[in-house]
Amino acid sequence: IIHESGFTAEDYKQYKPVVYSNTVQSLVAILRAMANLSVPFGAPEREVDAKLVMDVVARMEDTEPFRDTVKFASKRILLLGIQLN
């Protein structure tokens, strides 16, 4: 409704970093909450994936397009990595 006429090329350019950052920051919030609540990963390999994602934020690269390693690590965490008892 707000953008019923679509987005301009400038809109895409302006908001793309915000979308990347929001995505990574949301996943980091989940990872931190998991640690605080003692929610384990479904497999030990997801710890390595979590470190990859956390490193993106530590290097302040969260507004840039994701490298494949980070993209696939994020998918594995969200699809395979969280184990609730």
Image: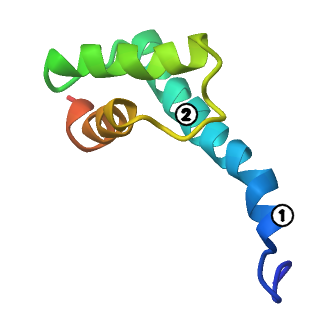
Q: What residue type is labelled 2?
A: Val
Dots 1, 2 in contact, CB < 8 A: no
The quadrant the N terminus occupies is bottom right
Instruction: Give the residue type at disc 1.
Output: Glu
Name the element at disc 2: helix
Q: Residue furthest bottom?
A: 5
Snapshot quadrant of residue 62? top right
User: Viewer-proximal residue, 53 or 78?
Assistant: 53
Q: Which image quarter holds the C terminus?
A: top left
Q: Can residue 28 be seen in this view?
A: yes
Q: In the picture shown, does residue 70 fall above or below 43?
A: below
Q: Percent from the top left, x then y, of residue 33?
A: 49, 20
* Residue that mark 2 sits on: 24
Report the residue at 52% width, 25% height from top.
Answer: 28
- Image position, residue 57 (x, y; %): 58, 19
Query: Residue 66: x, y in percent?
Result: 48, 38
- Residue 40 visible in rendering: no
Residue at figure coordinates x 77%, y 82% from the top left: 6
Instruction: State the mark number for residue 47.
Output: none
Q: Count residues near mark 2 (Cα–Cα under 10 Å), then give few for <14, some for 14-19, many for 20+.
A: many
Residue that carries the numbered disc 1 in the rendered image: 10
Q: Residues within 10 Å of mark 1 (few under 14, many from 20)?
A: few
Q: In which quarter of the image is residue 53?
A: top left
Is the image coloured rainbow, by chain, by secondary structure, or in one colour? rainbow
| 19 sits to left or right of 31 | right
Is 21 situated left or right of 37 in this image? right
Residue shown at 42% from the left, 34% from the top: 67
Of residues 31 and 64, the one nearer the viewer is 64
Q: Where is residue 35 in the image (x, y as percent from the top left)?
A: 41, 12
Asked whether 36 or 81 is in front, the reply is 81
